[in-house]
Every structure is written in C-alpha cells, then in structure tokens.
Amino acid sequence: MQLYNTLSAEERAIMIDDAGQQRLTLSFYAYAKIQDPQKFRNDLFIAWNALDALGRIYVASEGINAQMSIPEENLEAFRATLEVYDFMKGIRLNEAVEHDDHSFLKLTIKVRHKIVADGLNDDTFDVTNIGVHLKAKEFNEILDDPNTIVVDFRNHYESEVGHFKGAITPDVETFRESLPIINEQLKDHKDDKNLVMYCTGGIRCEKASAYFKHQGFKNVYQLEGGIINYAKQLKEEGLESKFIGKNFVFDNRLGERITDDIVSQCHQCGKPCDNHTNCENDGCHLLFIQCDECKAAMENCCSTECLEIIHMPLVDQVRLRTGKQVGNKVFRKGKSENLKFKHSGDLPETALATAQKQADIRQKIKVKKVLLGKAEHYYVKAQVGQFTVENHELNVGDKILISGPTTGDQELVLDKIIVNGAETQSAKVGDKVTFEVPFRIRLSDKLYKIIN
C-alpha cells in the first residue's frame, strides 16, 4: 500500500506532459475535530494518489488545509472523496485564477499540530465565533465606508505584489506575528470601526476573526474565500476590482494576476516587476522579485556571492552548506540587505507599470496529447519507423507527434500503417506498428497521439 511519493518532481513533470491532461489548481480548508489525524492523512493519500492528485496538504486534529492540482476529468471523483466526511460535504473549492498543469509536482500530506501556525491557544477563546463572511460585492461596499479599517493578514512578500487599496499591510514574515501587532494598532477602535480582514483563500481570517472578536472588537468581517474567490466573483458578476496587482500563491506559479497593475519593483534593479523567484543557490533559496534582465545577468541568483557559489564544483557547494540549517529554515522570505529595492509595510496604491498580456499559462503543454508508445527501429533506406503501442489505440488518419531530445517535436498525419506485418486500419496495445517517417528517428523518441 503506497502512502508516500515514489517519484521525483522531475519524473512527475514528464508524466504530466505525457498524459496530456489539463489540470485544475484549487484550494480548500475546513476546521473540524479529527480524532486520528494520521489515519485521516493515510486514507486521503490512498484516495487521492489513485486520482493522480498532487499538492501540499496539512492535516491536524483541528482540520485540513489543502492546495492541490488534479486532472480536470477527475474533479467529480475528487469531490466524492471529500463527501465521505461529513465536515467536507458541500465544501467550497477555490479554483485558481490561472491554472498551471505544473503548479504542484508531488502529493505531500503532512500531519501538523495546527493547519495554520497562528501561535494561539485555542482553549482560551471560542474559535467558532467568527466574523461575518462577505462576498465580493459586499466587500467592495464596506470598503467604501469611512468607518472601515481593512487589514491584510498575509505576509510582507505577499502584500508587496498585490493588496487591497487602503489596506494595512503588516511588515511581518509569519501570520502569528501579525495578530498582536494589529491588536495593538487598532485597540482604540474596537467599538467605532468595522474591522475588515482578508487573506489568500480565507483560512487565516477564520481564526483571526474569532481572535479579534474575543479581544473585544464589535464589528468584525472577513472576505469569504479570500482573494482567490474574490477574483472569481469579479469575473462572474462584472464587478470593479478594489484589489490591485498580483495574488501570491504557494505553488510553483508563485502568483496569479488579478489586475494588470504592477505595484512592486525588481529587488535588484528597481524596474517595475512582480515576478517572484527563488535564488538558484541551494544554500540560499531566498525568495525575491527579479525581472527577466536581472534573471539573465544574475543567472537567477539574489547576489554576486550566490552567483559565484553556483559556479563552484558541486562538492564545494555541499561543503559550504555543511552544518548549516537546510530546507525551509534557509528559505528566507525576501529579507536581505542585498535587495536594494525591497519594500514592505506601507505600500503604494498606484501602479508603477501595466503588465503585458501573457500567453496561456499552460505553456508546459503546447498540444493536448496522449502517450502511445516508443520507437523500436528506423529503416533508413525505406524511411520507415517501427513503434510499439503501449497505451491507447492508433488509427489511420490520426495526427501524431514524434518527440525526442534529438528529433525535437515532429507532427504527422497517418495515411497508412502496417500492424504486425499486415496493412490495417488500427493498432491496439501490444502491437508493433510501422509507417513512413520522412525524418530519422531514435530509440529515445516517444510516440504521441494529438487529440486537440
């Protein structure tokens, strides 16, 4: 029984491309009392692994917090795995504004003490006494009220690239840091102001709103479903966006565009830019904003020191990291004296530039295809290739793609095929198929059927 990943991210990326399936990026959370988090975790892994679901999920005795990628065709089957649990029946799935088939490359489900590290003692207040949920239209309306104070409960590297106009954006690296800071700043407005809060998908506000009600705030509101759901409702209802810029997300995309406004700068040259990256040096991995020009010049590094390190022999790089903290402890969230144009705390509400319209984010899959099999032989004089069909069926008239590191991507339409030595109209799994190929193929080439 498989309970953990057996493939690397690189292997999984290849499998995603070979499958040719469009994937959905989504997130959800639920607070509930889970008696056996480890069993709950294992049951989810078995069910989701069977559906080719990927993502980063935290479970605890207090509930579940998930960011995931699933094949679009498996959406209903995935919902069914949630409906097994009473507390997830009818749960809202926040679909990403921009789907990326490579947003997650592993299925990681971890048992934690809490699903969000908030530093709070839940026994000291009623965590179910939450603030009033506001949909996008209601949220826009309350922001126009002069008695409203709106607070961003995300971290500095998130708010820097995008935030609601007029929001307080705490200069913090963790959610737990923001709670006492905001409580101190707003202690004189517990009765006379609307305390309105938002975050990425809504989970941080669930606990924060209960905390601030416990602290004595009378009028506490939260954006239902966070920025992700807000953006969805804007499109569905044709509403004005009071959010400006990009929404930072915790997957390989590192952000999804809400408006065309760029409100941040490249941390190295100051050019308007809102594309996050991680330093190429494995001993650093600093999260920072870098424009294309600096990315090319600095080879994706945050500093000249890191640039020098990545060109050292691997053994020397490992030696430099020996004895130092690794993984997430090294993953500093964008605070470094090397970043001359880093901003946090009070942030601008006007755009520095307008983002250029980008091509479809699904750049990893240029054509929708399914893997059929692999090359077996190429008869040079006859210009005929032989392939073994390992998946699906191949028919005369199909449009195919032959792909390999040397061959590149070559498309053909089949007008004649020989299957197991005889001309026929179709080939099934296990068959040896030959057909004319007007270019040389290699044994490393794969055969795909284009299904666009």
Image (cartoon, rainbow, N blue to C red):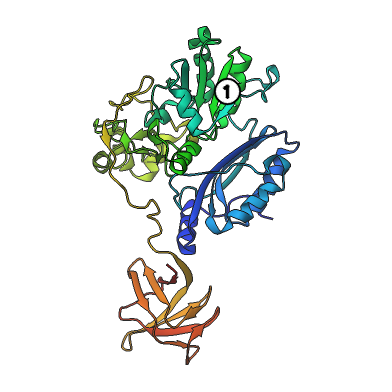
| Neighbours of disc 1 within 10 Å: few (<14), some (14-19), many (20+) | many
- Which residue matches tag 1? 208
Q: Is residue 446 above or below residue 146?
A: below
Q: Position of residue 369 (x, y in %)?
A: 44, 67
Q: Is residue 379 visible?
A: yes
Quarter-of-image position of residue 17:
bottom left
State which quarter of the image contains the N terminus: bottom right
Toward the viewer: 179 or 377?
Answer: 179
Q: Position of residue 73 (x, y in %)?
A: 55, 59
Quarter-of-image position of residue 416:
bottom left
Residue lying farthest right?
35
Q: Is residue 278 visible?
A: no
Q: Position of residue 211 (x, y in %)?
A: 61, 19
* Left or right for 245, reference 173: left
Q: Amino acid at mark 1?
A: Ala
Residue lying farthest bottom?
422
**For the point 37% across and 68% down, which residue is it?**
404
Q: Position of residue 121 (x, y in %)?
A: 66, 20
Q: Secondary structure at mark 1?
A: helix
